[in-house]
Amino acid sequence: MPTIETRGLTKSFGDVDAVLDLDLTVEEGEVFGFLGPNGAGKSTTINLLLDYIRPTSGRVEVFGMDAQRHPAKIRERVGVLPEGYGFDDPLTGREYLDWAIRTKDADDDPAELLDLVSLTDDAGRMATDYSKGMQQRLAFAMALIDDPDLLILDEPSTGLDPNGIRTMRETVADVAAEGTTVFFSSHHLNEVEAVCDRVGVLNEGELVAVDSRDGPRASRRRLPRAGARRAARSLRGPTPFPACPRAPRRGRNRPIHTPRPAGFPCLSMTDERS
């Protein structure tokens, strides 16, 4: 059974098609790269998968369940690293993790999670004072809570230096080797090529290509799944990583703003679609 399946998925805002007639299948345990320029509709697709916004037409199934009929059951099995978040509440890094663990009714050890993302020494600092890379690592730790069956990463390299990016790639490969499905959204071709089994290319809301790849994971023997978060080791690098400029859009499909996802009440999401 596929982890993600969409058929004829369309989301329009007025006369703008943010996502148009998307047919997509992501199999259990694979790393699927969702590649496209800023403004292509990647984040809108993620919002549709998690029922943060409703489609104009078409259907979405996650774990074989209708995303509109069973959003709560789906979300409890999903870990999300969103793009454009901000840690705005007066909470320390550890307090954010404590809150996220309680929200998911999980039994994770905050100290273990902090150690996995190399934030132990900064656990008592306000997250608002963290660098961009440190905030990214904290959000990654939150996404790994409760060993999700599906890990959704939206522009995961944001704020990470080259060493942090390399570690993130290794982590994604190891997490998938344990049986977790990974939906890896990025506008960096080298990122998705490094770890993904297949790559789908989205442009102006349309899936224009799907490529099966013989990447570095092709020869890996899949291991029994023993907890996704155990694979996340030593994510470092507070140095900001430059972002790509928004791609120009023409005609009916132009850049728009979409509603904020509601999955992280303590995280303020930007209103940009990417």
Image: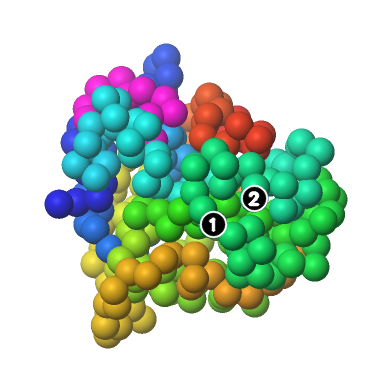
Give how far across and how far down residue 267 sits, in percent.
65, 37
Tell whether 53 sits left or right of 223: right
Residue at the (46%, 49%) spot, across then down = 79
Dots 1 and 2: beta carbons under 8 Å?
yes
**What residue is shown with label 2?**
97
Q: Is residue 129 above or below residue 15?
A: below
Q: Nearer the viewer, mark 1 or mark 2?
A: 1
Give how far across and how far down residue 262 sits, in percent.
53, 29
Q: Is residue 65 visible?
A: yes
Quadrant in the rendering for residue 268 = top right
**What residue is shown with label 1?**
108
Q: How many neighbours does mark 2 have within 10 angstroms: few (below 14), some (14-19), or many (20 or more)? A: many
Residue segment shown in magenta? 48-59
Q: State the count of labels.
A: 2
Label for residue 72? none
Residue at the (78%, 49%) spot, across then down = 92
